[in-house]
Amino acid sequence: MEICLIINISSCVFILTCIISILFAISGNYLIDKFSLEKKLPKLSKIIQLRIKFQCYYVFINSVFIILAIFSLIIVNTITLINY
């Protein structure tokens, strides 16, 4: 039972971390567009474009991690419920 609780807590923290990462990626692009940093800082333009290019992958990977964590939570909780 204690192991199930530890897995639940650590999975919830992991899911929150992934959600925060997704929010930072989305809000970062919003701020870049709002302040039009590509036009104001042409030296950083290539880095900003590279960041935008990889943002899709960050969101996809974090979404997959969240789905896997939720499935693992369901499995662990089901096994714990069956055994107790």
Image (cartoon, rainbow, N blue to C red):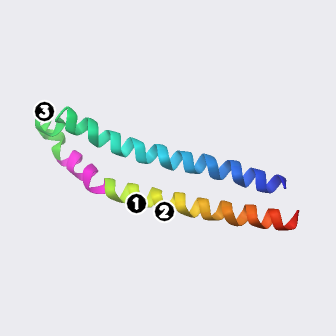
Question: What kind of element bears circle 2?
Answer: helix
Q: Which mark is residue 19?
A: none
Residue plotted at (67% across, 60% down): 73
Q: Position of residue 82 (x, y in %)?
A: 83, 67
Question: What is the spatial separation of the Cα atoms under label 1 and label 3, in whole angstroms?
Answer: 29 Å
81 sits left or right of 22 in the view: right
Q: Position of residue 25 (x, y in %)?
A: 36, 45
Residue plotted at (18% across, 48% down): 46
Q: For the residue marked with disc 2, what is the amino acid?
A: Val
56 sits left or right of 36 in the view: right
Residue bearing mark 1: 60
Q: Are marks 1 and 3 in contact (CB under 8 Å)?
A: no
Q: For the stretch drawn in magenta, what is the main secondary structure?
A: helix
Question: What kind of element bears circle 3?
Answer: helix
Residue plotted at (53% across, 46% down): 17
Quadrant of res 36 = top left
**Relative to 78, does residue 28 appear above or below in the rendering?**
above
Check disc 1: other Cα within 10 Å, few if <14, some if 14-19, many if 20+: few
Numbered disc in front, either 2 or 3: 2
Check disc 3: other Cα within 10 Å, few if <14, some if 14-19, many if 20+: few
- Residue 68 is inside the magenta segment: no
Q: Which residues are magenta?
A: 46-54
Q: Are marks 2 and 1 in contact (CB under 8 Å)?
A: yes
Residue bearing mark 3: 40
Question: What kind of element bears circle 1?
Answer: helix
Q: Position of residue 21 (x, y in %)?
A: 45, 46
State which tag comes first along the sequence, 2 or 3: 3
**Relative to 76, does residue 13 appear above or below in the rendering?**
above
Question: What is the spatial separation of the Cα atoms under label 2 and label 1, in whole angstroms?
Answer: 6 Å
Q: For the residue marked with disc 3, what is the amino acid?
A: Lys
Residue bearing mark 2: 64
Residue plotted at (15% across, 35% down): 41
